[in-house]
Image (tube, grey):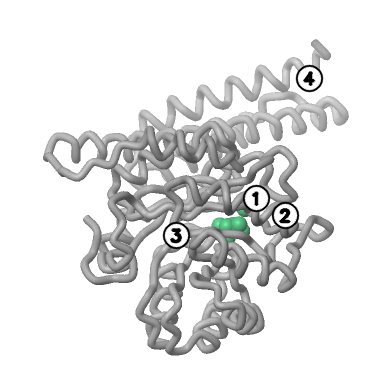
Amino acid sequence: MMTQNNWLEKMNLDHPLVIAGPCSAETEEQVLKIAHDLAKTDATVFRAGVWKPRTRPGNFEGIGALALPWLQKVKEQTGLLTAVEVANANHVKLALEHDIDILWIGARTTVNPFAVQEIADALQNTDKIVLVKNPINPDLELWIGAIERIQKANIKNVGAIHRGFSTYQKTKYRNNPNWQIAIDFKNRLPEVPLINDPSHICGNRENILDVSQMALDLQFDGLMIETHHDPDNAWSDAKQQITPVRLNEITDLLKVRKSSFEKENSLKKLEVLRDEINEIDASLIQLLANRMAISQKIGIEKKAQNVAILQPERWNELLQERIEKGDKIGLAKGFMEKIYKAIHQESIKIQESVISGK
Ligand code: PEP
Ligand code: MN
């Protein structure tokens, strides 16, 4: 349920909050075109990245402060509130000078307590809304710690954005939702509005509706969805942005469920657990493939050195070590033995085909 008397409650919306807008501000025309299109949707807030945290150098790193007056025009012309990402004290200063309404801390910044503290100090006593994205690593305490730093700077209008978590394994998501962390967040800080960012969770357009519905079913208070009039030609995150028309369709299709019947609740719990199983299985499958690829490399080495495939001593040691390791964390010995024998057999098969050249 929505919390009482916070900044979101005061907006008096009859639906979950929608924050929409492009990943990046690109040109004044692009910003204003998208904003005018969004003014006809459920969106209340216009988002646009001005300083973009890119994983590797050489990509578009944002227009910078030049775009801030464009956002002022958005507010004047459409009445939408404006939101940008800030990552240091200078960003905060510039955003405040341009009367930006909402400042959000990005996932790569939340991981760094020095950076969060610098931002909190620069924002001290502000009545602006400050949203804190989850850190890229699945660490609830780090997320809560960042929120506490903001709250300690006497900032009352605080919220959180769940945008998923990085993993090395490929899954169907760009960032794993790890819904349980969001559920735990809600339990720990029930007074802090929680917004879901399906765009950065999905990394594609196709799953935005399902992830948004899941978020609403878990009683999130709003959605932040990257929206662009020409997504394919966006300068960043082209694959995941949707058009304002599609945003409208999605908000029409979303079901906001107010009641929390026992049955529905337990179905949701099951869905969260199944989602976790799906993610773990995706990791397991990827890990098995990684392991087999290494077996193959070993096969190549054995062939070069003319060494036999089966090394009974190494195999026996490995098997016993794995069985014990599993046993220590509650996995049945017989189960571990079966799994490892199956893996080993497959490794041998792969090495055999390397050596025989088939
Ligand atoms: C963004 O919202 O454009 C962004 C960079 O997101 P995140 O910090 O979640 O990666
Ligand atoms: Mn983005």
| C-alpha span from label 4 to label 1 | 58 Å
| Kind of residue sitting beneath label 4 | Val
> Looking at the rendered structure, which numbered label has been put on residue 354?
4
| Kind of residue sitting beneath label 3 | Ile
Pointer 2 and pointer 1: residues touching (CB < 8 Å)?
yes
- Which one is closest to the eye, mark 4 or mark 1? 1
Disc 3 residue crowd, few under 14, some 14–19, many 20+, Cα 10 Å? many
> Taking 44 as reference, is 322 above or below it?
above
Pointer 4 and pointer 2: residues touching (CB < 8 Å)?
no
| C-alpha span from label 3 to label 2 | 28 Å
| Kind of residue sitting beneath label 1 | Lys
- Which one is closest to the eye, mark 4 or mark 2? 2
Residue located beneath label 3 in the image? 161
Could you say which is closer to the camera, residue 284 or residue 260?
Answer: 260
Q: Earlier in the sequence, mark 4 or mark 2?
A: 2
> Taking 345 as reference, is 143 above or below it?
below
Residue located beneath label 1 in the image? 33
- At 72% from the left and 59% from the top, the residue drawn is 28
Residue located beneath label 2 in the image? 29
The N terminus, quarter of image: bottom left
* Residue 332 visible in the current orientation: yes
Ligand 1 contact, mark 3 (Cβ < 8 Å): yes
| C-alpha span from label 2 to label 1 | 6 Å
The C terminus, quarter of image: top right
- Element type where label 2 sits in the image: helix
- Left or right, 5 with respect to 121, comes to left
